Amino acid sequence: MSITDELRLFAADPYTGWVPTDKQQADLRAIADRIDAEHERVRAESIIDMTDESMAEHGFVRLPKDADGEYIHVGDVMEWVRYKDDDPTIVRTVSGIGNGVFFAWSDEQGRYAQYEAHAYRHHHAPTVEDVLRDYACRILMAGCIDEEDELVDEYAAKLQLRGDE
């Protein structure tokens, strides 16, 4: 398969509405041949050994992976998962990447900071199912629902957001 297959097909297809002369077909094939040759040359020259040292020599860095093993890219929104507590989820937008780390704005520090990639995972807005699972776990930990009126109120408010979407 060639990157110019579509061009070659177009030049030879009488149903395109344009029927090239023999000279035009030859010219198009010659152009396609030059495109294919240049494409192969660039591909052959761009193949590098994928070791960290070789990549660094060419100005590349291996993408860091999050706690779930997914690659992190600039622009991704990450949430902190290293430690679970009652604080709201810490969410950061990736502005740069490094070796096993990413960089993002820190409201706490008032500047861009470096964060360990494996301490974060990609942020996804909670679904109704996520809220219900969390609720069920917290009820089980509490032991009974009668003593947890605040918990019922908290999750009722979260579920009401469903209609807002």
Image (cartoon, helix red, strand yellow):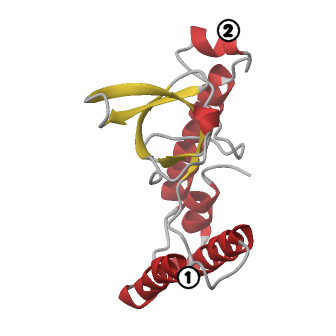
Secondary structure beneath dot 2 equals helix
- Residue 35 in which image quadrant: top right
x then y, percent, for residue 144 = 70, 80
> Can you name the residue that lies furthest to the front here?
147
Which of the pair 52/31 is nearer the observer? 52
Among the two numbered marks 1 and 2 on one chain, the one whose residue lies closer to the N terminus: 1
Q: Mark 1, residues whose alpha carbon is within 10 Å: few (<14), some, or many (≥20)?
A: few
Judge whether 87 appears above or below 157 on screen.
above
The residue drawn where x is 48% and y is 57% is: 24
Q: Mark 1 highlights which residue?
A: 15
User: Is 138 situated above or below 157?
Assistant: above
- Residue at position x 68%, y 75% from top? 139
Q: Quadrant of the C terminus?
A: bottom left
Residue at horizontal 68 percent and vertical 70 percent from the top? 142
Alpha carbons under labels 1 and 2: distance apart: 53 Å
Image coordinates of residue 131 in percent, x first then y, are 58, 75
Number of the label disc, if any, that sits on residue 53: 2
Crowd rating for badge 2 (residues with CA inside 10 Å; few <14, some 14–19, many 20+): few
Q: Is residue 146 above or below residue 68?
A: below
Disc 2 marks a residue whose amino acid type is Glu
Q: Nearer the viewer, residue 51 or 10?
A: 51
